[in-house]
Amino acid sequence: MQPVSKPDNGEFDSFKGDIEAAERRVAREIDPGARALVIAIGVFVLLLSFVLPHTGGAKGLDVLISSDVAVREGITLPSRVFIWLALVFGVGFSMLALLTRRWALAWIALAGSTVASLVGLLAVWSRQTAPGGYPGPGIGLIVAWLAVIVVTYHWARAVWVRTAVHLAAEEERRRYVAEQQRKGLLDGLDDDPKD
């Protein structure tokens, strides 16, 4: 029987590798919780915005494929770039990140959606200041821009919360390593010789 003041690290050390592997696996995953539903709804609204009028008679899909209707409506580069960024990052990477729950994919979705939000602002502005004869922004462009902003906001919250958990686990790991390094060679030996 061992005294209470002396911990038995033998059992813990045998599971240390398993615990570290599980910690690394968990560190690569996110758990957006209720935000996953909000992000999924945002992705769905973003997909619906592609069939709504982007500007004039051009729908979001027309802008995406640069159809004749989009050319007639005078669709500019910011609108095209916004629609592609919204599709790739707002829809594509967001769906991948939600399905796989991978932290790296969530970061990519966040970064791309952030850029898409800013380019969306430029797209709306360029439609509002279009030369005479060209229509202003349509409901599809506005809805797509707002949906990308919502998706970006919720990805940022999901990723940063996960980052705080990572930092706490990393701090705990650093504390444990520092404690192990402080222990000397003789700290593990009993002072009382056994009979």
Image (cartoon, helix red, strand yellow):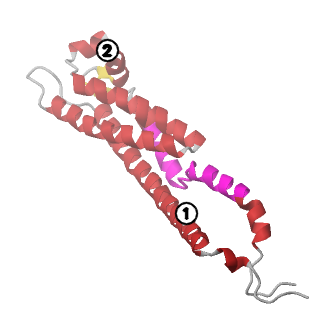
> Mark 1 belongs to which amino acid?
Ala
Above or below, 11 relative to 120: below
Three-letter amino acid code at the position of disc 2: Ser
Q: Viewed as shown, does residue 66 lie left or right of 26?
A: left
Q: Are marks 2 and 1 in contact (CB under 8 Å)?
A: no
**Which x, y percent locates residue 46?**
41, 35
Give the position of the C terminus as an image quadrant: bottom right
**For residue 110, which numbered disc appears in the image?**
none
What residue do we see at 50% from left, 42% from top?
104
* Residue 180 rendering spot, x and y as whole percentages: 61, 70
Residue in front for this viewpoint, 167 or 71: 167
**Magenta region, main secondary structure:** helix
- In this image, 2 relative to 103: left or right? right
What is the x, y in percent for residue 93?
A: 48, 35
Residue at left offset 47%, top offset 46%: 39
**Is 166 located above or below residue 110 in the figure?**
below
Is 47 drawn above or below residue 187 in the view shown? above
The reply, left or right, for residue 131 in relation to residue 12 is left
- Measure how far apart labels 2 and 1 are at the Cα level: 48 Å
Q: Image point 76% across, 61% down: which residue?
A: 15
Residue drawn at point x = 87 percent, y = 87 percent: 194
Report the front residue among 112 and 25: 25
Identify the residue under disc 1.
Answer: 169
Residue 61 visible in the snapshot: yes
First-in-chain label (2 vs 1): 2
The circle on residue 66 is 2
- Label 1: which secondary element: helix
Q: Which residues are magenta?
A: 17-45
